[in-house]
Amino acid sequence: MATPRTLRDLGLVILLLGIPVLLLRSAAQDPHHLSPFDRAVRRIGGPLEAGLGYAATTVGSFFERWLLQARLQEVNQELAGENRQLRLRLRELLRVEEENRELRRSLQMRDKVAEDMLAAEVTAFEQSPFFRVLKLELDRGDRYVRPGMAVLADTGVVGRIDRVADDRSDVMLITDPRSKVAVEVARTRAAGILEGVGEDACAVVVASETPAQVGDLIQTTGADDLFPKGHPVGQVVKVEELVGDQQRLSVLPAVRFDRLNMAWVILASAPAPDTMADQRQRPGAARGLQPLR
Amino acid sequence: MLRASLLIALGWVLAAGIAGLGHAFGLTLALPATSVILVCHLAFERERGVPAALAMAIILGYLEDLHQGMPTGVLALAYALVFLALRWLGARLAVAGQLVRGLTALIACAAADLLTWAILAALSGPLEISRDALAGGLRMIHWHALATMLAAPAVWGMIARLDALITRMGGVGARSATPPKPQLTWKRP
């Protein structure tokens, strides 16, 4: 049995359902028509929608920027990593280039110097107030190297082997006070004994028949049977006139010892030139290798 | 009354907000029918009388009509019918937990879409709507329902917060501490 309340609710429901039906009927009659109430609701809803859209756009653009920044940060990190790798690669390439240059110099040295040489890597440069010593690491041990052997660089004379221990040797530089090298002024051929005076400087006393000048090149004479003849030693930086027609020349070594990476130990003197080389007949090739005539 | 007004305001803001968000982010996916979720809530809560809840469902449908550019009254009628069906089901089924609420929203949305399609199909002549275009819309119903199901927990959460706010305010229409009177009409037979 339906109660009055139920009947009232049922009536209200039917009445309420009639509202959308009426709205639909109105819309069906004129789909494009909007009632004043519709317009009022739309007047409120339009700005609400636009405002929410604007807020969403603002928040969205902020979020997008934030995401973009995060993405840019990631890209930046990737690029930084790549940059690090490339820097390492570049450093490696520079090292290889330097090594290549050293090897080229080595080959040029072998062309320039006729003597038998042994390449050595410079491992240290000791500089006490009294002695100037270069440490070399040899690639073939002390079986070949003996104290007193000359040491050259591509730019000039370095010094002499002082001590040898296993595959390491100490080189007494030409600036060492103990060092003595037979040299000459390249322009005047005035000979003398170059002595080390420390502080990256050497001195030599020569005859002043043809006076030496600042800037003259000093080179080895080969008279001491240690250094090959004509190898550069240094440059005159100061000239002092001495009594008895002599000059004392201050010489700046041609080699920058602190920047030296590679040196060559002269193992043996070059053989004497063969004056009969042109006259000697070359032996003929074996029969099997001769061209057919 | 306050609670009913706030619920309608929430539905309006959500309807406008979803459209605004869709536009702002250029979403091409189906957007959730947030008003359907509110209709579900109205149907399954037992504190409000059927006529009052039905009136709210119709208002929500009417607002959606205006926002979606539908002929006025289509969604109002569809929501009203879906509400009545859900209210009838609510007397027989218990809806608790996020998953069940989501599934309820999914079914309600699908039902509302089908009803909308049926109403539009019936009035396609006077409303000057192509039946082929309506058939195309029918193929999107499942995506719309799925989007609504995914949005359901969030909307229900908003409703819960709104309820908590009204309770704190202690205003007129706030949720009563005493249990509601049983609705004889919707009582389990």
Image (cartoon, coloured by chain):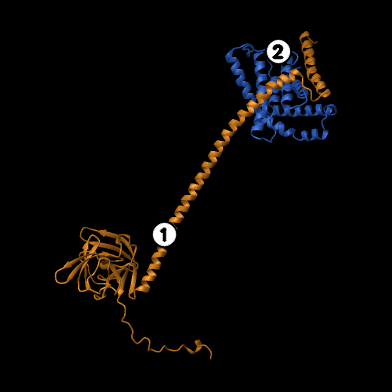
* Mark 2, other Cα within 10 Å: few <14 / some 14–19 / many ≥20: few
Is residue B159 visible to us here? yes
Instruction: Judge whether residue B94 can be spotted in this image.
Output: no
Residue type pointed to by label 2: Pro
**Whole-number angstrom distance, CA of label 2 to CA of label 1:** 91 Å
Q: Nearer the viewer, residue A133 or A169?
A: A133
Which quadrant of the figure has residue B159?
Answer: top right
Chain at numbered mark 2: B
Task: In the picture, one chain is blue; tell me its letter.
Answer: B
Provide the chain ID for the residue under circle 1.
Answer: A
Please state the horizontal and vertical placement of residue A120, each as a whole percent of the image: 33, 66
- Considering only vertical position in the picture, is B24 above or below B54? below
Give the percent coordinates (x, y) of residue B179: 65, 12
Residue nearest the viewer, comparing B185 with A126: A126
Compared to residue A120, the image places residue B73 above or below, namely above
Chain A is shown in which shade? orange
